[in-house]
């Protein structure tokens, strides 16, 4: 698995190799090696990713990279997760953890 992958709305992000391009954060998290980085281009994305490994999710700015969901945006079950330069919006949880549930 690659240590770096890219996410953009079209899925054609210009990564060094085509198999490093993703159209969703959920699939990018599943396709990056533990300890790797998911680079997220500007845009609005649907959340719903479950994260169970060390990973960094790095956006293109908190006003231009928005991850939203009708339920939990991120569920972190294990690992150290770094979320940077992005905004989390519209998440909700029945009992707890609307945006990020740990």
Image (cartoon, rainbow, N blue to C red):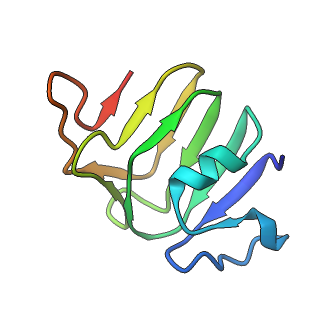
In the image, residue 77 lies at what x, y percent? 49, 21
The image shows residue 26, relative to residue 78, as above or below, that is below
Q: How many labels does the image show?
A: 0
Q: Is residue 40 left or right of residue 99?
A: right
Residue toward you, 47 or 86: 47
Residue at (54%, 80%) from the top-left corner?
10
The image shows residue 45, relative to residue 95, as above or below, that is below
In the image, residue 83 lies at what x, y percent? 48, 40
Residue 75: quarter of image: top left
Q: Is residue 82 left or right of residue 30?
A: left
Q: In this view, does 19 lie to the left or right of 12?
A: right
Q: Which residue lies furthest to the left in this view?
A: 94
Residue toward you, 58 or 101: 101
Residue at (55%, 71%) from the top-left corner?
8
Quadrant including the C terminus = top left
Residue at (32%, 63%) from the top-left corner?
63
Residue at (29%, 39%) from the top-left corner?
72
In the image, residue 59 lies at what x, y percent? 50, 56
């Amino acid at each position: 698995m690659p240590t770096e992958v890219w996410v953009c709305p079209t899925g054609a992000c210009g990564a060094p190799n085509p198999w490093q391009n993703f159209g969703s954060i959920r699939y990018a998290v599943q396709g990056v090696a533990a300890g790797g980085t998911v680079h997220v281009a500007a845009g609005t994305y649907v959340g719903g990713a479950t994260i169970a490994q060390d990973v960094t999710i790095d956006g293109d700015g908190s006003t231009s990279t928005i991850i939203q969901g009708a339920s939990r945006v991120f569920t972190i079950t294990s690992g150290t997760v770094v979320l940077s330069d992005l905004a989390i919006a519209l998440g909700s949880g029945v009992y707890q953890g609307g945006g990020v549930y740990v």
